[in-house]
Every structure is written in structure tokens, then in C-alpha cells.
Amino acid sequence: MSRLSFIPRVTVFSLFLLATAALPASGQVGEIRKWLKRVDTHYKALQTLRSDVTRETVNPQIGSTDSRRGKIVLLPGKGRDFAVRLDWSSPSEVLTVVNGKFLLIAPSKGIAYSGSADSAKSKSGGAGALRALSMSEADIRANYSAQMGKDATVKDGTQVAHLILTPLVKNEYSLVDLWVDSDGMPRQIKITLRNGDTDTWYLSGIQKNVRVDGKEFSPPIPKGVKVEPV
């Protein structure tokens, strides 16, 4: 990943951590600040990121669970100039988010969607978990409270700290859970919507500071695929 961007040196994941600025008045304050600093230190050394990703969405109202696997490429940067690419399998889809704009290519449906990263269509493709990229640090600090959960272990055996973030104002989601490894790298994110649905992202096979070509964030539209603005 070249240095397109992902917010003032704050990735989609570390952005969530910045929300911890609205700290609880308990003995957890020092622990939360420690993890915030660790994530910031980690990110300062991060030039690019490639990773396998598993996304699991659960609708408890009807008892349905949907799981998808894919690969993610992140290109950190500053301001609103960020770059993210998600390649999903089964069905095959490509989602890119660059400078607050998204492109979702669904070859099997013969259509591609483009528009603001805040749109409902972009979120359905995966941009919802990345929406914090377009938020300022001040906004995040003003809108979240945080607390520490119990330490845990993610699927590959990595030990992680658990941060629980709660929006201070009514939002489409009621909770964001983050599991962060000892290096300061968020390894798992769980977003709980107000209706009880959950959207969980798990990263594995992480490769940091490897070569990334900026062209990866401009995937070609397959022949026969219609682009529909949303």
C-alpha cells in the first residue's frame, strides 16, 4: 500500500480505539490509556497491511448466521485520504473505499455500486465496519465511552486485551468490542447493532509493511457489469 490514507495516522481499527478518550471514572482509566498508546505506537510504524479476514453476521431474531472469508488490504495515511480493499469469496465481490467513496463490484449479479462510504449499500458490502475512517478524532472522543473487558484468546491462539466502546449518543449500533494483541494490532472487531444483530470481523495471517501497489485500489469493472450510483 502506498500512503493513500486512513485518517490522521489512525486506521479503521485504531480509530475505534481513539474513542476511548471518553474514559470511565474508574480504575480502568490507566489500562485504557495504556492500550490506546500501544495502538498509536504500533500504527506509527505501520506502512501497509495485508490480512485474511473472516466476517460473521448474526441475526438473532430469525436465528441466522452468515460467514464470509476474504482478504483485506489497508493503506494508512492522513486526513480523509484513505485506501481499503476487501476481496470477498462465495460470492466473489470486491469492495474498495478511497477518500470517502466506495465501489462494490458484484460480478455474479452483473452490477457494481458506487457512492459515499456512508451509504447503506457500502455498509452491506463491508464498508460499515470502516465508516470511522471518515470521522475526525474530536468526533470520536466526543461520542464514545470505554471500559476494559476480560482478556481473551482469538482463534489462532493470540492473547488479546478486550476494549468495549459505547456510543454516547443514539447511533445505528449500540456497542463496539475490540480485541487488541500485545503489539497494539486490533485482531477482532464486533459491532452490535441496536436491533441486536452483530457483525464480527476477525483478522489472521497478518503481513505488515509489505509492498502494496496503489493500482490495487482501482479494480477494473468486468465487461458486462453495470455501474449504478447510490
Image (cartoon, rainbow, N blue to C red):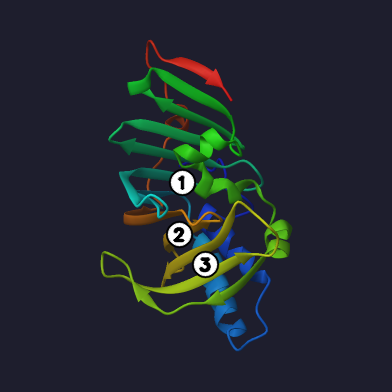
What is the crowding at mark 2: few (fewer than 14 residues within 10 Å), some, or many (at least 20)? many
Which residue appears at 60% of the width and 72% of the height?
146
Which residue appears at 53% of the width and 19% of the height?
228
Residue furthest to the front: 62
Badge number at residue 152: none
Camera-nearest residue between 23 and 47: 23
Badge number at residue 39: 3
Q: Amino acid at mark 1?
A: Leu
Camera-nearest residue between 27 and 197: 197
Would residue 221 be seen by someone viewing this image from the given angle? no
Q: Amino acid at mark 2?
A: Lys
Cα separation, mark 2 vs mark 1, equals 19 Å
Would residue 19 be seen by someone viewing this image from the given angle? yes
Residue furthest to the bottom: 27
Cα separation, mark 1 vs mark 3, equals 16 Å
Question: Which quadrant would the N terminus be assigned to in this image?
Answer: top left
Relative vertical location of residue 39 with respect to residue 221 in this rendering, above or below:
below
Question: Which quadrant would the C terminus be assigned to in this image?
Answer: top right
Cα separation, mark 3 vs mark 2, equals 18 Å
In percent of width and height, residue 71 lies at 34, 43
Q: Secondary structure at mark 2?
A: strand
* Residue identified by numbered label 1: 74
What is the crowding at mark 3: few (fewer than 14 residues within 10 Å), some, or many (at least 20)? many
Q: Amino acid at mark 3?
A: Val
* Residue identified by numbered label 2: 190
